């Protein structure tokens, strides 16, 4: 059952997503987000008592929206080597939602220090994300060469995306993370897929795709 | 000419490196570092007026020591696909110096936010590091397939290292970054080098190598 409290919570989350995407980590204030939803700052703090709680809830909602968006674009892109095509779409989407990528990268970096309030969330999140990529690769393993280690490959793919985001955020005009990820995915598909060329052709034409609205 | 001030500065840097490597980002204090060198905290602040200044100086010294260490281990590992073998050695070295990797990852993440005091340093550092990997690959390009894009590949290799470090710092017992990087480098060498198998054999035996002392 969706209660009125749940609906308000969702409203705050989407408003926060929009404000963070536009303004980034430091310039987005809790007051600005509350104003966007039309509630008081105390009302916001009732749902999200601290800024890290709100930030991780926003990142969790982003992950969910990303999954839904990708599943709708290409249901076949959830398994096997075709997964790389969907991840390229995600890299291109991230390029256009830089404020959220900035929050993600900054908070993930901070989270590795001891006792950081977002450490448990990021630890869980990486467990979930790498397990999900591994499961997707395994579910389409009949299209992969038999010597592919899907567990290690899942970690690698996630690492490439994170590392390119960091370089891109620091030098957005010089670092083309879509080109770098496409180059990586093309080589990876050629060295792991049994029938690579149709997927390589798909990589060449898969982006850009139109962005959906993040807020309802 | 090396002045007494320079020598003291170096002494502080190496002490900071040891203290940060042992204690990590938050638990290492300026007071503890000053004590380690046998100077007052005011004396330390004379050389490094802020914590970000000291941290980036430590990371710069780490980069220099890493380069010297790698050049000594395998002078041929600075060019072409053999560079990947040296980078695997670096991943293994990082695994054993986790406190410095923690500082690096946390500060790099924070640096992507607007106006962060370490942003300019990281922006320059990534420019230098990716240019140096690209130049190394190009200098040995006769051992690479002609369709390799060394500029994009340099970004990718650096991204993989950064991204794996993040996952490893969050789950050190579960994430084997040496295994993941070796798997990546093996596939990469097989898909880019003209004569891959001798290098793949080298990857299999290149680590662990004995650690040098960081402090003099």
Image (cartoon, coloured by chain):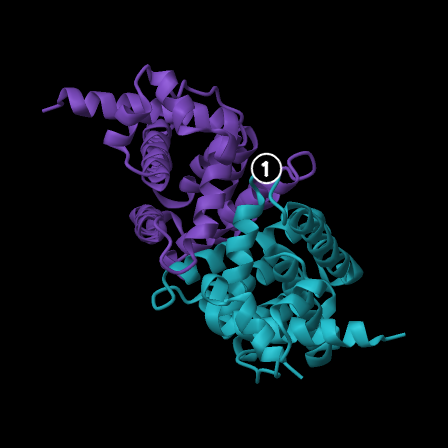
Chain colours: A cyan, B purple
Residue B1 placement (x, y as % from top left): 9, 24
**For the point 63% across and 42% down, which residue is it?**
B170
Residue B16 placement (x, y as % from top left): 38, 26
**For the point 50% across and 47% down, which residue is it?**
B162
Q: In this rendering, does residue A149 appear at all? A: no
**For the point 66% across and 63% down, which residue is it?**
A45
Residue occupied by mark 1: A114
- From this view, report whether residue B107 is shown above or below residue A58: above
SS class, disc 1: loop
Q: Is residue A63 left or right of residue B203?
A: right
Question: A25 or A145, which lies in front?
Answer: A25
Query: Please, which chain is the residue tagged with disc 1 on?
Result: A
Q: Which residue ends up furthest to the left in the rendered image?
A: B1
Looking at the rendered structure, the number of numbered marks drawn on it comes to 1
Q: In this rendering, does residue B104 appear at all? A: yes
Question: A189 or A215, which lies in front?
Answer: A215
Residue A118 placement (x, y as % from top left): 63, 49
Query: How many neighbours does mark 1 have within 10 angstroms: few (below 14), some (14-19), or many (20 or more)?
Result: some
- From this view, report whether residue A7 is shown above or below residue B80: below
Q: Is residue A173 left or right of residue A4?
A: left
**For the point 53% across and 73% down, which residue is it?**
A32
Q: Quarter-wise, where is residue A33 in the image? A: bottom right
Q: In what quadrant of the picture does the C terminus of chain B appear?
A: top left
Question: A137 or B9, which lies in front?
Answer: B9
Residue B125 placement (x, y as % from top left): 33, 48
């Amino acid at each position: 059952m969706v209660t009125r409290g749940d609906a308000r919570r969702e409203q705050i989350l989407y408003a926060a997503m929009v404000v963070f995407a536009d303004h980034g980590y430091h310039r987005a204030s809790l007051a600005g987000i509350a104003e966007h939803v039309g509630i008081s700052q105390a009302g916001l703090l009732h749902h999200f008592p601290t800024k890290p709680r709100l930030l991780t809830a926003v990142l969790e909602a982003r992950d969910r929206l990303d999954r839904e968006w990708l599943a709708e674009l290409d249901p076949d892109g959830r398994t096997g080597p075709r997964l790389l095509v969907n991840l390229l779409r995600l890299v291109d989407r991230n390029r256009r939602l830089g404020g959220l990528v900035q929050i993600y990268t900054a908070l993930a970096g901070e989270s590795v220090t001891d006792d950081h309030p977002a450490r448990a969330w990021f630890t869980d999140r990486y467990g979930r994300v790498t397990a999900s990529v591994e499961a997707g690769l395994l579910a389409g393993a009949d299209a992969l060469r038999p010597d592919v280690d899907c567990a290690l490959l899942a970690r690698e793919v996630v690492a490439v995306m994170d590392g390119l985001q960091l370089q891109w955020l620091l030098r957005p005009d010089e670092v083309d993370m879509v080109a770098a990820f496409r180059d990586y995915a093309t080589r990876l598909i050629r060295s792991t897929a049994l029938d690579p060329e149709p997927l390589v052709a798909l990589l060449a034409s898969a982006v850009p795709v139109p962005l959906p609205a993040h807020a309802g």
